[in-house]
Image (tube, helix red, strand yellow):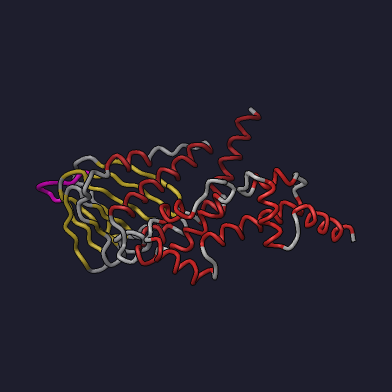
Amino acid sequence: MTCIRLEVLEVDSLWRDGNRASQVYFISGGHKPVNLHQWGPGVRDVYALHYIIQGQGTLETGGQQFRLGAGESFILFPHKEIYYYPDPADPWEYVWVEFSGRNAGRFVAWTQLSVQHPVLPAAPETMEPWFYLAWNAGASPSEVIRADARLHLLLSCYMELFPCEKQEEATDYVWLAVKYIEQNYWKSSLTVSEIVQVVNLERSYLFRRFKAATGESVSAYITAYRIRRACELLQSSGLSIQSIAYSVGYNDPLYFSRVFKKATSHTPSAYMMLHQREVER
């Protein structure tokens, strides 16, 4: 009984977690077989993304009417009046997923969907399996997390297939490069060419943008970040110089010591002792 109660408390904390609510989270999903079901006019307080498997129907919202058919998608925006209904002669069959979260609108904005145009043309491939993948969120912590992850996977497919026109312009290539460096600086094999490949931008163009944004070249930034992390480890980790060298991407402790001294005017051991004296004061 104690274990069951503990699990309930954990699930409750997951659902109520403010961090989860601030992101994008799954609420429900389903499949509507061919029938004459209609909804509205009315408003919802969540986002509801629909994908039409077959048949036809109509969405009315914002004073506009959208005629939809197989392969197309439409979304219901929170607090926007909508009315949708099937074609009596060829009623639609569709799947849907509902989601919310303070960042939900941001995710949707990375696609071509908008309040003014809440529909998408037929996808180049069926989206139906992605919707099924996002369903069936249970009550356990693992199921809650899995449902959110599957929702993100579904939305990422829409972002890829139907990117908003400004998505390319909004891509911060310098941020991508910096993020990759800060996540992989510990690898001794990290190279500038690898970063260029990951960012997927012409080499000289990336170099110009990176220099303008950071004041440093890509290689200089890698070195500076490694030395900064080494300083932090020398101050507080209690690790040996050799371990710290390996931890920040240098397989050769002697070479690490030369690079460190050039950057800080101190050898690693001298820097460590200097910091220890400052702490003891």
What stretch of residues is rendered in magenta?
87-93
Q: Position of residue 15 (x, y in %)?
A: 53, 46
| Residue 212, above or below 16 | below
Q: How many marks?
A: 0
Q: Residue furthest left?
A: 89
Between 198 and 192, the one lying in front of the other is 192
Q: Residue at x 58, y 37 (%)?
A: 8
Between 235 and 267, the one lying in front of the other is 267
Q: Is residue 247 magenta?
A: no
Q: Position of residue 107 (x, y in %)?
A: 40, 57
Which quarter of the picture shows residue 43? Answer: bottom left
Q: Quadrant of the C terminus?
A: bottom right
Q: Position of residue 88 (x, y in %)?
A: 12, 49
User: In screen coordinates, is 198 left or right of 237?
Assistant: left
Q: Residue at x 26, y 64 (%)?
A: 117
Between 165 and 15, the one lying in front of the other is 165
| Residue 171, above or below 132 | below
Q: Quadrant of the N terminus?
A: top right
Q: Residue at x 37, y 63 (%)?
A: 79
Q: Secondary structure of the magenta portion, mostly?
A: loop
User: In screen coordinates, is 278 left or right of 12?
Assistant: right
Q: Residue furthest top?
A: 1
Q: Position of residue 192 (x, y in %)?
A: 48, 55
Between 222 and 54, the one lying in front of the other is 222
Which quarter of the picture shows residue 231? Answer: bottom right
Q: Residue at x 78, y 52 (%)?
A: 269
